[in-house]
Amino acid sequence: MSAFGPGKIILLGEHGVVYGHAALAGAISRGVRASAEPSTQPGLELPDDLSEGQQDALERAFAVAAKKSKHPKVSVHVSSDLPLSMGLGSSGALSVAIARVMLEAKAGKAPTPKDVEALAFAMEKEFHGTPSGCDHTTSARGTLVLFQKGKAIEVKSPRPLKVLVALVGPRSSTKTTVGALRERQKRWPKRYRRVFEHINALVGEGVQAVKKGDLESLGDVMNMNQGLLSALGLTSTPIDEMVYTLRAHGALGAKLTGAGGDGGAVIGLFAEPEPAVVKLRAQGIECFASQLAGPRAL
């Protein structure tokens, strides 16, 4: 048996979600697949491309999954086409894929979405300590969602909502970037609160734009969100250069996605992203397209 957990992007509202504000997040076409074979006891084949720290975290998370799913007798293998540590929800996707296959192996039937989310969240705590819940919830739902304080509501679009995801390069850990922002926020709370409130308002405007199929308005909201993320000190020269590159290739809006900092991923909203993907790959830029919502969504 096998199960898939899609990665995710945050279209609007990253970082604010940590402080209880809303975020608009969508599942993407790339992700993690977990497959299970009968075994004498629960086991996990570790991928070869993980660091020692990543392997340790994965082993801890799998131990939690095995215990909470009542030790199904399967050996689990995972494969992924999702870049690690790029702000694309790799650990959330991994947690959802493993949760699905472990629960099905024990019960002999497909698990409920509620059970998958609960087990995946327990695994995410091993990866991140106090995760917001946005990553694994978006992955488990497999759609575009408005996420706030542990609750997610699907957001539908009458038009295809397509993005180009471009990889900028290695970045500092999410914990480091979030921690540095938290320290600045503690030092000047009123100033930073105002910025988060502005971002939260943009999320609301972005949701309305999605519902109306107004891609131009959504792109403008994304550009404004990027400006506020820059004001929060979450961008860098490589990120800014990629933002301007995507806009130069026709993006209606472009911004970092995820923690940001000194690397990670940048997303651009396109009516049709495929031509830009071809041009950017010809320049040596690693990128791919994905549809988040609307007719024929992936």
Image (cartoon, rainbow, N blue to C red):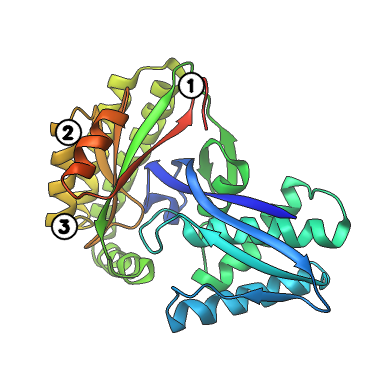
CA distance separating discs 3 and 1: 32 Å
Extreme residue in the right direction? 108
User: Measuring 81% from the left and 60% from the top, which residue is drawn there?
Assistant: 105
Q: Secondary structure at mark 1?
A: loop
| Image-based side of 106 in relation to 138, left or right | right
Q: Which mark is residue 157?
A: 1
Quadrant for residue 82, please give it: bottom left
CA distance separating discs 2 and 3: 17 Å
Q: In this view of the protein, which residue sits in the foreground, 67 or 145? A: 67
Q: Which mark is residue 247?
A: 2
| Image-based side of 151 in relation to 85, left or right | right
Query: Few, some or many C-alpha atoms within 10 Å of disc 2 (few <14, some 14-19, many ≥20)?
Result: some
Find disc 3 in the rendering and name its residue: 236
Which of the two labelled residues, at mark 2 and mark 1, occupies the earlier sequence position? 1
Residue 226 image offset from top left, x and y in percent: 23, 43
User: Measuring 44% from the left and 22% from the top, which residue is drawn there?
Assistant: 160
Q: Amino acid at mark 3?
A: Ser
User: Measuring 24% from the left and 27% from the top, which residue is drawn there?
Assistant: 252
Quadrant for residue 233, please give it: bottom left
Q: Amino acid at mark 2?
A: Arg
Q: Secondary structure at mark 2?
A: helix
Quadrant for residue 249, please give it: top left
Which of the two labelled residues, at mark 2 and mark 3, occupies the earlier sequence position? 3
4 in relation to 293, above or below: below
Q: Please identify, in this view, whether the residue under mark 2 or under mark 1 is nearer the observer.
A: 2
User: Measuring 75% from the left and 53% from the top, which residue is drawn there?
Assistant: 115
